[in-house]
Amino acid sequence: MLLERESELARLAAALSAADEGTSSVILLSGPLGIGRSALLRELPGVVSGPDIRVLRANAAPMERDFAFGVVRQLLDSLLSGATETDRNRWARQPGRAARLMFGTDDLPAGHPPAGDMFAGDMPDADGAGGPAGVASEASLHGLWSLLADISENTRLLILVDDLQWVDIPSLRWLAYLAERLRGLRVVLVCTLRDGDQGAGHALVREIAAASTQILRPAPLSPDATRAMIRERCGAAGHDEYVRACHEVTGGNPLFLMSVLLGMEARGYAPTADYADRVRTLRPAQLRERLASYLRTQPRAVRDVAAAIAAFGGHGDPALITELAGLDEIGFGAARRALRKAGLLADAREPRFTHRVVQDAIESAMSVAERKRWYAAAADLLYGSGRPAEQVAAHLMAVTGFGRPWSVMVLRAAADTALRRGAPEIAARYLRRALLGHRAQDESRAGLLVELATAERGFDPEACQRHIVQAMPLLTTARDRAAAVLRIPPPLLGAVHPSTAELLRGVSEELGPSAGRDGPAREMALRLEARLRHFGHENPGELASAMERLRGLGEEPPLGSAAERELMAVLLFSGILTGRLAAADAARTAGRILEREPATSAGANTVLPLVVVTLFAAESVQDVASWLSTEQQTRWQNATGPDGVLLFAQRAFVLVSQGRPTLAREYVERAMAPADADWSEASTMILSTIALELRDPVLSERILARARWRRSAGLALTASLQILQASVDAQRGLRAKALEILLACGRQLGVSGWRNSALFPWRSHAIGVYQRLGDSHSALRLAEEELAWATAWGAPAGLGRALRLKGWLQGAQGVPLLREAVTVLRGSSFELELARTLVLLGRQLGSGAEAEAALREAGVLAAACGVPWLVERAERGRGTASAPKTAILTRSERRVITLVGSGLTNQEIADELGVSSRAVEKHLTNSYRKLGISGRHELADALPA
């Protein structure tokens, strides 16, 4: 495609029209690499073709510059290709050298030089002048000019020469001769010239350029032209973001743009917003080779400046680049201008390439030794000029040897910077490189190993532990060994490798107990105790010991230090696993921990998620919600990897607990969006619980597919996924299979002493499956067990759910249990569970005012929660399936309606909520409209609750 070149084509057509009146033209098409000069030249004959126009075409090439008169021969060959026999005979009578150049034959009049001498006198000197006395050259040049003059008497001539900078010297001399003598001829000479090329500075090229009547410089393509090219190439319109990315990375250069589109097409990427980022990172191989070929033709100074800019990788200022390239300011300025004119350098203060592939092209032209030399020299200059450690380290990474005493120091500093900005993988790369340069088996090497383990703990726990083990023999004090071993991330709810437990146990025994210690020694001892106790969370004996330790700390355990909070988090979690700790007690202490925990410690590789899980199990959702919305606010923007997954999962659980499943799904999607992000056991448990609460088999299957089924998976992860899988099977009708999975899960949990159904609700799911399989006796037995546990645990939603399940099994006799469940659930934030219970109560009652009120309230709650299937169930119970759907009130509208039901006036409601009375009136008007009532007097019938 030739886009946005109408202006250039029109001016060229106008010049050809003027030639019909005897006004000749010399037109120069100039511009950087890839701007489309050659494409424009190819298109020109088709635009201005006519019966009285003869087109002569020649294409120069760098490998043919030593072929004398090569371009002239191409022009004459194109002249002969369409010539008649009469024309050929007439042209054969031209002066000897002109005829020989055209026909290459000795069948010419006597007196001409023999064939072997036909270029005698025409071979130029280095400065472009002719041979001896220049007489023969002048004759040849004039003969060719006379030939064109004779032809132009009968037809207009359009002479096209592509890449003037590569034309051989004799042909250049003839073109310069012609350009000075076109007046009166019906000839238009159009030449293309690449900016920044060495050949563009030749004296004869400058002479031709000086003789030009017009210089045309095609502009880069606009965004609209970019969009048109994408549509033509891809067969579909590109998304705005995709088009924007293509235009930004290519700068509207047609060659760059086409290379990117071909590269995206080869990879099967559609022009959608999803692939816009791929456009920005693509480095087309075809374009790289094209640019590398261009650079090989440039002078040494230009190549050296390009290599120096590549070596600095965008971190070098002009002074450093000049020094690295070994040039003075004048030489650097000339080379920089050449690269900029060629379109390879952006017009910025610090030289940088217009596209990443330019750097690839430069590096591909280097040998391994050359690349090492350039990067090593760049690192020396950056270090000597005091540049940031990461800039220097990036260059050290490209150097294979260590000949610099400061290398390890710089790499460690760079790793520290990378860790602080949230890039642990990059930090690990720097530290591994530093280890290669530090061979001595000493404490310094141990320090490097510990730092590497710290970087790896978030994305490669196994490597973290391996490097800690390697560091241990090199550390000289028990405190250092304790500090090192505590860098190994706690497995939270995963299985513990025996070697890890043995390592911590040995260090703990060496360091001694926390009693009688203070300061850092006590902190380390407490943290080691927390890790060791948590490692035994699948052992009933260890869990019992943890409960004794918890009771020994009293009702107000110390939580002032991080180590005290870590130990308490582990002990609390042990208590809720066994069910020996009441929900209210667990929530109170866990809330105190969360109040004191800074936001920066909320990582997936700490024990803090155990506190959040404890609060979720105890239904103290508001504590987590407040913490996430205040202290954690600064972390949302930078949450990545397992930490980001955990944060989004926690937020989703809060929302689903508050009866906002639609918004909860958005956070679930955000948690699952990074396809390569690893999930911690806590994240998997939370997401599984959300899927169970939403009763969404599609979401459940996605979570099961993403979850990491590993041999090292602990009981918590295994049980969560088993319950989720059983839920999916039950919804598919595979009830026998689901029941088998649930009962096996329950047995596994029982062996470990885990009794908490809030964490692992296998019994509540097994009750439903038993009942649907017709085994009411077994279902009732489990329901009684569930109710006994929920009563002891004391969390309202868990107790309400247990009452609902047993009431459901007892039919009409279970109505008192359902009424009790409704009463209990009104004290909970789990509105969706309340709606389910109200539906069941209304259907069990069958008819009457109480049934009608329960079903109406259930429909409103379900609609507000965004659960249409439950709304329909409530309406079917009322016998109003064909009636308009129950109104969906916003949370603000529901709060205003609740206060109205309490008997408050509009002004009193406004004072209570801190809003204007007009805002209250607006909420009431919308609520009345949605409920289909006219005012307050009908509100009691619409919402009796």
Image (cartoon, helix red, strand yellow):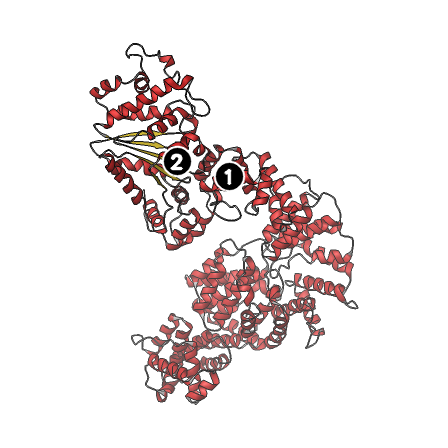
In the rendered structure, the answer to whether residue 81 lies left or right of residue 308 reads left
Q: Quadrant of residue 836?
A: bottom left
Specify the quadrant that holds the C terminus: bottom left
Neighbour tally class for label 2: few under 14, some 14-19, many 20 plus, Cα within 10 Å: many
In the image, is residue 478 above or below residue 378? below
Q: Between label 1 and label 2, give the one nearer the viewer.
A: 1
Q: Position of residue 108 (x, y in %)?
A: 28, 12
What number is the disc on residue 193? Answer: 2
Q: Nearer the viewer, residue 843 or 644?
A: 644
Q: Position of residue 885 (x, y in %)?
A: 33, 75
Q: Quadrant of residue 175?
A: top left
Residue matched to label 1 = 334
Q: Nearer the viewer, residue 493 or 385?
A: 385
Which of disc 2 and disc 1 is earlier in sequence? 2
Residue depicted at x 49% and y 62%: 724
In the image, is residue 916 above or below residue 772? below
Residue depicted at x 63% and y 39%: 400
The Cα atoms of the two marked residues, 1 and 2, are separated by 18 Å
> In the rendered structure, which amino acid carries the disc numbered 2?
Leu
> In the rendered structure, which amino acid carries the disc numbered 1?
Ala
The reply to whether residue 457 is visible in this rendering is no
